[in-house]
Amino acid sequence: MADNAHLPVAPHAMNLYIVTGTTKGLGEALAARISLDQDNELIALARAPDGPIRGGARFEVDLADTAALDKVFDRVEERIRGKGYAKAVLINNAGVVAPVAPLERADAGEIERNLVVNLVAPMLLMGRFLRATEAGAPLRRIINISSGAGRRPISGWSAYCAAKAGLDMATRVVALEAQARSLRVEAVSLAPGVIDTPMQGTVRSASAQDFADVERFRRMKDEGALRPAMDVAEDILRAESAGKLAGDAVLDLRDLG
C-alpha cells in the first residue's frame, strides 16, 4: 500500500503511542505522561498482565520471546485497524543490562536475552509498526531508547554495548530507507542520559570484580547525579512533540537543550 493512501484523519484525530517496558523506570514514566493527554491513545507492551490502563490498554509480553512478540503485535494491529491517527509513535524503551561481567564469565543465556530484548525485539517492532501504521497515520515516529554505552565501550557490558550500538545502526538504516522512499517517517536512537531507575540499581549491585566502574556509578547515586525518570520522560515527549528528534538518527537528549 502506498504511503499516501491514508485513512481520513478527523480534525481532532488522536495520537497513537506504543511504548514497551512500562512497568517501571523510564517506561512507566513515559506511559504516565502520555496518558495525561486525552488526545493520546496508549498501547503499553510489558511483562505486567493484560488490562485497561489510563489512556488505553496494556498487553502482556516477554520481549525475549520473539514468537510471543509477533502474536502480541497481531493484537495491536487488531486494536488500531480502521482508525485514523494524527500521528503514530513507537517508543522502544524496554531494556536489560545483564549480564554485567567480563565476557569470559558472562552467562550465555543472559547474553542471548540481552541481545534479543535490546536489539532484535526493537527491530521486529519497528518493522511491524511501519507496516501496521502505513495507511493510518500521515506522520510516524520511532524513538529507540539507546545509551551512551552504544557509543563507547564499558568494561563488563559487552552485550549491552553491542546491542545498543546495533540499535543505533538499525535506526540509521530505517531513517535512510524512509528518506529514500520519501516517507513521513522519523526514526531516532536517543541516549537519554543517566536516569534513576531499577536498571541503575542492578548496575550498582555488581561486584568490582565483574564491573570495574561500579564505584563511579555508586557515587553518581550518592551525589544526586541521576535524573528522575519523570523529568527525562517529559523532556523526551516535549522534544518529540516539537519535532526536535527529526534529522540526525542518533542523538543524545542532553544535547537538545
Image (tube, helix red, strand yellow):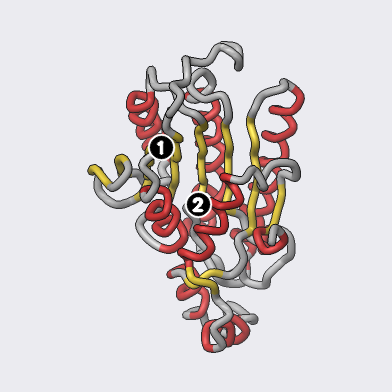
Count of numbered labels shown in the rendering: 2
Q: Position of residue 55 (x, y in %)?
A: 32, 43
Q: Residue at coordinates 33% horizontally, 51% vertically from top-left?
A: 47
Answer with left or right where residue 168 lies relative to residue 74.
Answer: right
Q: Is residue 242 above or below residue 219?
A: above
Q: Quickly name the residue at label 2.
A: 93
- For mark 2, does the 10 Å Cα neighbourhood hold few (<14), some (14 to 19), or many (20 or more) residues? many
Q: Is residue 232 above or below residue 9?
A: below
Using the image as rendered, state which of residue 98 and residue 17 is in the foreground: 17
Three-letter amino acid code of the residue under disc 1? Leu
Query: Residue 124: which disc?
Result: none
Q: Residue at coordinates 47% horizontally, 15% vertically from top-left?
A: 8
Query: Which quarter of the picture shows residue 175?
Result: top right
Query: Residue 69: which disc?
Result: 1
Provide the secondary structure element on which disc 2 rests.
loop
Provide the secondary structure element on which disc 1 rests.
helix
Q: Position of residue 133 (x, y in %)?
A: 50, 25
- For mark 1, does the 10 Å Cα neighbourhood hold few (<14), some (14 to 19), or many (20 or more) residues? some
